[in-house]
Structure formats: C-alpha cells, structure tokens
Image: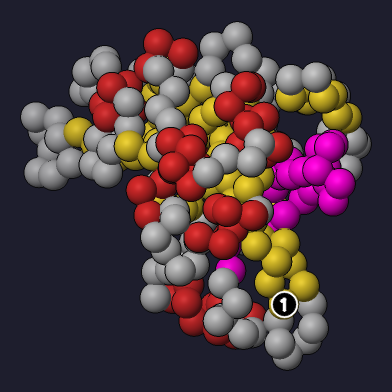
Amino acid sequence: MCNYLGYKVTHVQFIQLNHIEKELGAEAALGLLRSGFEYGNWEVVRANEAGNEVAIESMHWEFLPPWIKTLEEVKQARKQGIPWLNATAEKLLSSKMFRGAALKRRCLVIASCFYEWRHFKPAHAKKDIAYPYLVSLPGQAYFYMAGIWQPWTDKETGETLNTFAIVTTAANSLMQQVHNNKKRMPTILPEALAYEWLFGNPCETRIQELAAYQLPSEQMNAYPIHKDFRQQADPTVAFEYEDLPAI
C-alpha cells in the first residue's frame, strides 16, 4: 500500500530524534516523488554499530529474504506480484521472513508525505475510479515511519545490499476514507516512539504494539492531486474533482 513516498522540504539539512541530531548530507537521494516499484534506494535511519548514534543510509527499497539467491530470482518473484515493499504489522513477528529483522534490525524511513488512492464510483461511471491523494502531517517538515531492514547477497555476483520494508498498520479514521479499499496506512511514529523503535530494547509484545501504532487522524492531512501526478513538475499540487465528494 505505501508504495510512493515524497520529501518536499529540501532546505531541511538536519533530522532530530530526541537528543540526537544528524545531518542528512548533500548526497541524500530524497525527492518529491519516489515509487517503490522502481526498486531503487531511499534514505533510512538506523542505529550505528555501537547503538548510541544514528546512521543515515541509502537502502534498497524491497525487503529481500535470504532464500532468494540471485537477482534473476528477484525478478521472477516480482512477476509473481511479490515485491516486499511493505511489512504487515500484525504478521511481523509470526512471519518467517520478517521476524528476525523485527527483533534485531529495526529502522526508520524518512518522508514528508506519501501518496495513496481513494476509490469512488461517480454517478456517470460504470465502476470505481482511483483518485490519488497526498497525505502529510501539517506543521512537520518530515516524519518517521517504522521500518525493518535486511542484508541480502546475490549468490552469483557476491554483491550485498541492505534492503528494507515499511511497516504498515490498520488505517485510522482518515485513512479508512482515503485508502478505502484495503484500509491500511504506514506506521508513523512520533519522535519518542521512533526513538524507542530504533534504540530501545522492547520485548516482543512492545515491538508488536509499536508496529501497530496508529497516528491519530487529527495529526494528518489528505487532499486529492492530479491523476497524472507522476508526470507533474510538482506532484504535491492539490486538484479538485467535480465528481469526488470531500472526506
């Protein structure tokens, strides 16, 4: 579900996580719009080896398990509709694929917004139409989404990638109206919970609680954008549809 991310505020040079401040750096590959289906990189925050500082790393957005051995096998998995861009909170600890990362390799994914589709059937239409929405947190230049990461090595080439997935949870009341077919949303963590997700030593019950956290609707904003937003110079510009009722 959370397969399109955006980072709009290019003047922000530092991120803050409780008492820790970290420079994003000029090499940060964040942009107005990035699709997970490009299978590229996105900036991810993880704990350093000592566990007392944050490291910002550009990771491959597609969680790859060790039983997939080569890039060719990855491509075949994609054809079967199995790009692991997201990890479901409810299955995080019961999943053979995600459990190890949830216990030992948690991370935070930085974004200023994400893009989602609302399905609605206008009177003139024969079936539902998907209308794109931009979702953000008013007053916040960026926010943190819970993530998990996994190193993966191509057994043919020896190339190693750090790969990640965004954790998703059940939609709050706003996102139930926006993402109204699957009713899911990314697990967006306030600063204190983001710090705990990254640096805490939570038990399994607490990991499950954090993974399933729902940011309250009143802290979020959503509005419709152009259907061809991916071709727009600024994909975040609002667009009004005459046949689409407000939420």
Q: Is residue 61 within the magenta segment?
A: yes
Total numbered labels:
1
Q: Quadrant of residue 151?
A: bottom right
- Relative height, residue 85 to residue 147 (above, below): below
Q: Is residue 127 magenta?
A: no
Nearer to the camera, 230 or 3: 3
Between 207 and 23, the one lying in front of the other is 207
- Residue 152 occupies quadrant: bottom right
- Taking the spot 72% from the left edge, 55% from the top edge, the residue there is 59
Q: Quadrant of the C terminus?
A: top left
**Magenta highlight: main SS:** strand
Tell me if I can see residue 164 in this picture. no
Residue that label 1 marks: 153
Left or right of 170? Residue 207 is right
Place of residue 149 in the rendered image (x, y in percent of width and height, measured from the top left): 64, 56
Number of residues whose C-alpha sits closer than 10 Å to that of mark 1, classed few (under 14), some (14–19) or many (20 or more): some
Q: State the SS at label 1.
A: strand
Q: Is residue 208 above or below residue 171?
A: below
Residue 245 in the image: x percent, y percent?
22, 18
Residue 123 appears in view:
yes
Q: Is residue 192 above or below residue 121?
A: above
**Residue at 58% over, 69% down:** 64
* Residue segment shown in magenta: 42-64
Task: Residue at 28% x, 38% y: name it.
Answer: 183
Residue type of the residue flagged with mark 1: Thr
- Observer-nearest residue: 232 or 212? 212
> Outermost residue, bottom direction?
156
Q: Residue at horizontal 26%, vertical 26%? A: 177
Residue 223, image x, y percentages: 41, 20
The residue closer to the viewer here, 161 or 71, is 161
In this image, 79 relative to 68: left or right?
A: left
